[in-house]
Amino acid sequence: MDIRQLNYFIRVVELGSFSRAAAFLHIAQSALSRQVNNLETELQERLLVRDGRGVTTTEAGDRLLGHARSLLDLHERTYEDMENARLGRTGSIAIGMPGSLSGTISTPLIRKLRGELPEAKVHVLTGRSTQLQESLISGRLDMAVLFDAPTNSMLEIHDLLEEKLHLFEKMPEGESEIEGPPLPLTALTDIPLIITSRPNRVREILETALAREGAKLLVDCELDALDTTFDLANDGFGRTVASLRVRKTTRTAKLLRIRRIVEPELVLKLQIVLRTRRLNNRLHDTAFRILRDLCLDIFKT
């Protein structure tokens, strides 16, 4: 197996046929087919299903596709880093974060990186925590902002903040106090919630804590769009659970009444996570410092 074969395989999958991939790669279709067949023989797995409409991946092909993309990305970044070192350029940095943070962090982060590292190429990627963790391990990301990252020998975790979870609900008629009385955790079993679909760290914390009490979360609606979630809560269509950070990142959240969850209190950790094995250079050290200071400046209360 080599990089060329993996590149060929990716192009066939992405373009959906050997003929289109061969034209794109400027090679004979027979040669392309032979390289993919060699790959299947070496791995002892059927990777593609060929039919009259083109090609689709098998289960083994899907697994290889994820690995192949990560390896090609790392291959390209390795060449880029070596060339940058040879030419004296700063290089590139890839930083990941959940979509719930991107709108608040991305713009000031890029501005600060441009100010201190004007020649650096900056990649800011958004995704779910599980996707970001996989990208860190595979080398596609240099660092990421995550919530409660799992312990992993391939990841280096730096805690930033601890955020307590609160119930957010429509302000009761005639009341003006933003903070309502604390809410015992078990009371959530009687409150239909609007909440993010799995995998989601806040949801995992709630479900795990309730399971210890022999109870279950009462989910009324699943939404991945935070703005819509808080808009619905403000319209009285339900309640949701989040940390107070969302009052800074989501417009409607600051209009809602908040109630701290207690007995026990539930805590969400904001962290910066890096690969254990990584390039140690000025660019990465500077990017880490800027990202850390920015998160603390924006979210520390």
Image (cartoon, rainbow, N blue to C red):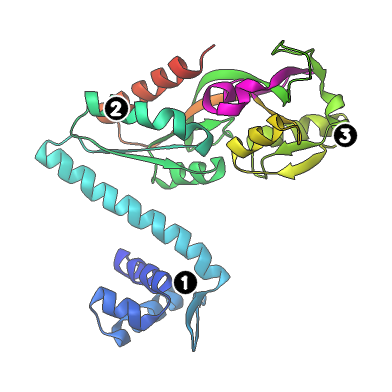
Residues under numbered marks 1 and 2 in contact, where contact means CB atoms less than 8 Å apart: no
Of discs 1 and 2, which sits in the foreground?
Answer: 2
96 w.r.t. 19: above or below: above
> Which circle's residue, 1 or 2, is located before the other in the chain?
1
Observer-nearest residue: 164 or 221?
221
> Counting other residues with Cα less than 10 Å from the Cα at mark 3, is it few (<14), some (14-19), or many (20 or more)?
some
- Range covered by the magenta-colored residues: 243-267
Compared across the picture, whether 99 is left or right of 143 comes to right
- To which residue does mark 3 refer? 215
* Residue 221 position in % (x across, y down): 74, 44
> Which circle's residue, 3 or 1, is located before the other in the chain?
1
Amino acid type, label 1? Leu
- To which residue does mark 2 refer? 111
Q: The C terminus lies in which quarter of the figure?
A: top right
Quarter holding residue 208: top right
Amino acid type, label 3? Ala
- To which residue does mark 1 refer? 43
Amino acid type, label 2? Arg
* Residue 273 position in % (x across, y down): 47, 31
The Cα–Cα distance between marks 1 and 2, rounded to whole angstroms, is 46 Å
Of discs 3 and 1, which sits in the foreground?
Answer: 3
Compared across the picture, whether 236 is left or right of 243 comes to right
